[in-house]
Image (tube, rainbow, N blue to C red):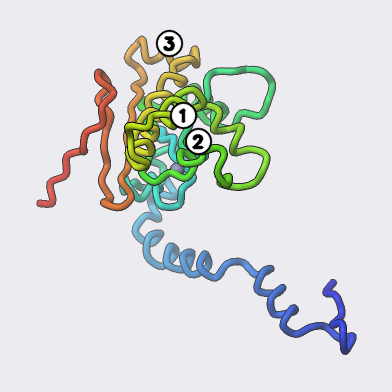
Amino acid sequence: MLPPHPECGKDDPIETTRTSMMNSFPDRLLEGYHDFRSESLSHERERYQRLADDGQTPEVMVIACCDSRAAPEMIFHSLPGEIFVMRNVANLAPPYKPDGAFHATSAALEFAVQSLKVKHIVVLGHGRCGGIRAALDPKSEPLSPGDFIGKWMELLGPAAEAIAKNEWMTDSERQTALEHISVRHSIANLRTFPGISKLEGKDQLSLHGAWFDIALGELWTMDPETGDFKRAPFDPN
Ligand SMILES: [Zn+2]
């Protein structure tokens, strides 16, 4: 129920319009849905029907950041059913910790590895990551003044502290360094899951790191031996 207008006692038309706009489903999403139905779905209808009938069998899981600029489905140009995506702040994989608490990322990992039996897990970092920035400078205005991000970014605690203290590096060097370190750190955490390390030991599961440069649209992949990141091959022809 809307509050009455303070002067005339009737509904405030501006407030009424504002409220109805807030309550309506976002136009941008309805427009996108229209394009999906009229364009993408018409090309992929058989695939959707097959996925509905047979279920999903993606071979790749991607752990990516929530950042709207680094969507794995866009970067890898994937089709429905091809990659199983878990997104969280700063694309972090936590260590194995079956303590009865709520663990969204671990639940997704469990499903991907034990049920879907994915063959690859990719941890995908990205440039200009706000979560990483917050981890580097926890005393600054928090990314969101809430109850959860600070705790979540503690997953990177010692590494973030060490990089933040390095006065020889510029701000952008620290940022990129921690973005890369966080990918390596998440891969190390993945290996603390007994099911993952066991399958990796039997060559039935591979762990990979990657990093996406938003400004250039470039993908960098992690060398599994050295941990260094190298630009992924791209041939425009
Ligand atoms: Zn991010």
Residue 217 position within the rendered picture, expressed as x and y whole percent measured from the top left? 28, 50
Q: Please give the name of the residue rendered at 47% of the width and 45% of the height, measured from the top-left corner.
A: 130
- Disc 2 and disc 1 in contact, CB within 8 angstroms: yes
In the picture, measured across the screen, residue 181 lies left or right of residue 157, that is left
Earlier sequence position, callout 3 versus callout 2: 2
The amino acid type, in three-letter code, at marker 2 is: Ala
Residue neighbourhood size for the residue with mark 1, other residues' Cα within 10 Å, grouped as few (<14), some (14–19), many (≥20): many
Distance from Cα at disc 3 to Cα at disc 2: 31 Å
Whether residue 121 can be seen here: no
Distance from Cα at disc 3 to Cα at disc 1: 29 Å
Camera-near label (3 vs 2) is 2
Give the camera-side residue of 92 and 137.
137
Q: Secondary structure at mark 3?
A: helix
Give the camera-side residue of 14 and 35.
14
Distance from Cα at disc 2 to Cα at disc 1: 6 Å
Residue 77 position within the rendered picture, expressed as x and y whole percent measured from the top left? 31, 49
Earlier sequence position, callout 3 versus callout 1: 1
The amino acid type, in three-letter code, at marker 1 is: Ala
In the picture, measured across the screen, residue 138 lies left or right of residue 117, that is right
**Residue 235 against residue 125 in the figure, above or below:** below
In the picture, measured across the screen, residue 24 lies left or right of residue 137, that is right
Q: Which residue is mark 2?
A: 135
Q: Which residue is mark 3?
A: 198
Give the camera-side residue of 25 and 190.
190
Earlier sequence position, callout 2 versus callout 1: 2
Q: Which residue is mark 1?
A: 160
